[in-house]
Image (tube, coloured by chain):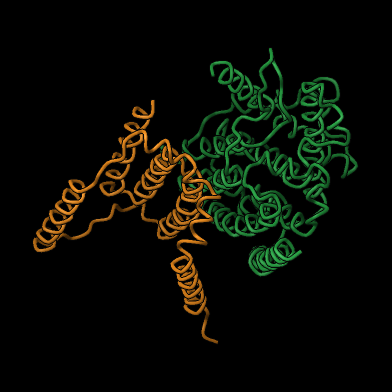
Chain colours: A green, B orange
Amino acid sequence: MISVITFKLILVSLLFLVTLGIAAYSTYFERKIAAFLQDRIGPNRAGPFGLLQPIADGVKMIFKEEHRPAGSNRLLFILGPSLAMATALMTSAAIPWGTHIEIGGHSYAFQVADINVGVLYVFAIVSLGVYGILIGGWSSNNKYSLLGAIRASSQMISYELAMGLSIIPIILYTGSLQMSDIVEGQHQVWNVFRYPLGFLIFLICAFAETNRTPFDLPECETELVGGYHTEYTSMKLGFFLFSEYVNMFVSSAMIATLFFGGYHFPGLSSLEHLPNLAAFLGFGVLFAKILFFIFFFMWIRWTIPRFRYDQLMRLGWQVLMPTSIVLIVIYGAIFSFL
Amino acid sequence: MQQILFYILALLAIAFSIATITSRNAMYSVLSLVATFFALAGFYLMLNAEFVAFVHIIVYAGAIMVLFLFVVMMLNLNQSPVNIPRPLLARLAAVVAGGIFGLTLVAALSQTILPTSAESTALAEVGSVRTLGKMLFNEFLLPFELTSVLFIATMVGVVVLTKKEE
């Protein structure tokens, strides 16, 4: 019992560091990829190839002057970015990072919490993510912040529905809401080949949920100055910006887990007598998949322009949601009659 | 361990419920209610009902309360704390109603047989999705279907109400 708790604690702190590290370096790669796509060089002053840029940015964020707008609510103004960051970091607890690890004859699952309704846990936390933005935007006492916050909340509620519906065929196929079962169910064929359309809907919704281009209307700078974080300065602003990258990492992990076989790779079953090697190779493979999707997020951002707000709502409610309901009916019929 | 957890959650639930109804700022009220829902979800988790706990958070904290916040923000109630006039008659009626409700609760409590700890551990599987689904589609099929009809009727009603006259 004690050894399990120690293992989980180590795993949690490790995941925490990895998540923050990936998020920090995502900011660097975002700028490098943007530069590459726009035929520029990108950050190259801090360290070799500009590799120390995230650290320089972090130090800058911390030492900038703190400012709180007049008439804003002090408690809620601090609560906003804290909630945004906390909810972003909580999701990764349910994701299986690899097969079992054996230490001293004991076998430990390479996952923080294998909750029996893991998928629902992730969706519950994602649905709470909107509070940080909403509270931060409202407490700034600024009309642009408020508009950004309201846009964010309606956008996230709208796309959550389609997102939840799009993975129901997977749950029907697996017969379980547990993340580890869903990964095990992709032992032979990845879910993306079984449900290509469901994957597309999930991917679009993931973009909308993380407020990334083409759905970044909550912080649309041509209309709303900076959106919900207009009034934020210093590390509070840093938390908002950073939570977006953490969300991107977690969304990529979810896409890889639900649709791309998670830690599975060809030849995993032949490594059964070497469980630790299999677990770490699986971890590496999962990370390669995650990094590809983070790159994909950035690729889209610098390629496709922003939607208009009415287009966004029409896409969510009139295209994605009906399509996913039809998919549920089709796959339900396939699973019960074939 | 379980008992300590229960008392912490109970304390939080009560404190935040009181904050919900006493707070003058509508924003604080909504947020306290969200916190109350979290404490309740904690109780469900302690009763091995993971499914109910997470659906509770998704539906209430994630969707309904966000809409509440939305309304509070749109009306911009923060500048002036709400001052509702309270006539004497209304106060008297509130006291009587509260007294009757309290009496009902006490009567119900005195009739309840509280489960012993041995019984509650035997129900470890009771809250799982599998058990819940089997219960819903076998024992409670008719009420379940009736509820879905009610939901569809509500949805159609909302669409009709919000549709603009052409």
- Residue in front for this viewpoint, A298 or A90: A90
- Residue in front for this viewpoint, A195 or A87: A195
Q: Position of residue A215 (x, y in %)?
A: 69, 55
Judge from the rendering whether residue A144 lies leftward or rightward of residue B67; answer left or right.
right
Q: Quadrant of residue A105?
A: top right
Residue at the limit of the structure toward the top, as seen here: A104
Q: Is any atom of residue B80 visible in this view?
A: yes
**Quarter of the rendering occupied by the N terminus of chain B:** top left
Q: Quadrant of residue A93?
A: top right
Judge from the rendering whether residue B50 lies leftward or rightward of residue A328; answer left or right.
left
Q: Position of residue B158 (x, y in %)?
A: 48, 74
Q: Is any atom of residue A72 visible in this view?
A: no
Q: Residue at x 85, y 20 (%)?
A: A48
Q: Give the vertical position of A66 relative to B112 (above or below).
A: above
Q: Position of residue A74 (x, y in %)?
A: 41, 37
Q: Position of residue B21 (x, y in %)?
A: 27, 49
- Residue in front for this viewpoint, A152 or A277: A277
Q: Residue at x 51, y 35 (%)?
A: A82
- Count of numbered circles on the image: 0
- Residue in front for this viewpoint, A208 or B138: B138
Judge from the rendering whether residue B91 lies leftward or rightward of residue A197; answer left or right.
left
Q: Residue at x 58, y 46 (%)?
A: A126
**Quarter of the rendering occupied by the C terminus of chain B:** bottom right
Residue at the limit of the structure toward the bottom, as seen here: B166
